[in-house]
Amino acid sequence: MPVIEPFEENCAEYDRWFDENRFIYLSELEALRHFIRAGETGAMGGRGVEIGVGTGRFAAPLGIGVGIDPSLRMGEVASERGVSFVVGVAESLPFRGEEFDFALMMVTICFVDDVKRAFDEVYRVLTVNGSLIVGFIDKYSFLGRTYILKKENSKFYRYARFYSVDEVMVGLRYAGFHKFEMIQTIFGGLGDITAVQSYREGHDDGSFVVIRALK
């Protein structure tokens, strides 16, 4: 079972981080928006779900209508932001097959018990040619190395498992995903981010990586 207690007990502190680190949050949001255009129809329109929705900080502004999370307290906040919340875990999604046109996993892979099973489940609930967008901190990046060194002192990241780009790609391919696109942002340390940063293609320079893969 995923570790829920830190998020239940520190929900307000978790949500406040996005206000205290506004430009980091907005930079990550802008990178995700490259693949998810709120309110659009077409390839990235249709019905979407965020897996590991937390307090809805990403689902709400991106126009994602459904979110799933094991934390009820976090889900209550997401609901207040207009997201239809469902309690559950990534490894056993309570949805029908081919129910969604796209899915977002925003740092969720760091906290699931079984990434392979989670990717398999996402694949199952996506329509043919549906998209999975995975946002995560590359463990070999500056920020990834910093979080790993300090994770024992963090209420949240002490329970996290960090992944490299190659490890995430292997997992996606194993689940059957293909046609990958990748962008990156968050260049420098947290204290260096004093404005919304632009994203660019590829990885290795930015700490935050977004991969889009098709079913």
Image (cartoon, rainbow, N blue to C red):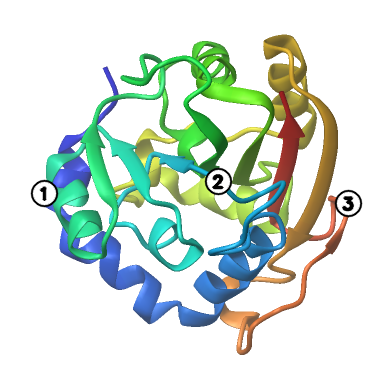
Give the percent coordinates (x, y) of residue 201.
88, 57
The residue singled out by tag 2 in the image is: 46
Place residue 142 in its image quadrant.
bottom right
The residue singled out by tag 1 in the image is: 9
Earlier sequence position, callout 2 versus callout 1: 1
Give the percent coordinates (x, y) of residue 76.
14, 52
Q: Is residue 199 left or right of residue 44?
A: right
Three-letter amino acid code at the position of disc 2: Gly
- Count neighbours of disc 3 (C-alpha within 10 A) and say few if under 14, some if 14 to 19, many if 20 or more: some
Residue at 31%, 19% (x, y): give it: 94
Secondary-structure class at tag 1: helix
Indicate whether 97 appears above or below 159. Answer: above
Indicate whether 187 appears above or below 99. Answer: below
The residue singled out by tag 3 in the image is: 202
Secondary-structure class at tag 2: loop
Q: Is residue 33 left or right of residue 117?
A: right
Three-letter amino acid code at the position of disc 1: Glu
Residue at 43%, 45% (x, y): give it: 151
Earlier sequence position, callout 2 versus callout 3: 2
- Count neighbours of disc 1 (C-alpha within 10 A) and say few if under 14, some if 14 to 19, many if 20 or more: some
Three-letter amino acid code at the position of disc 3: Gly
State how far apart marks 2 and 1 are (Cα): 34 Å
Give the percent coordinates (x, y) of residue 117.
51, 11
Give the percent coordinates (x, y) of residue 98.
53, 20
Q: As rendered, which of 5 and 78 lies closer to the eye?
A: 78
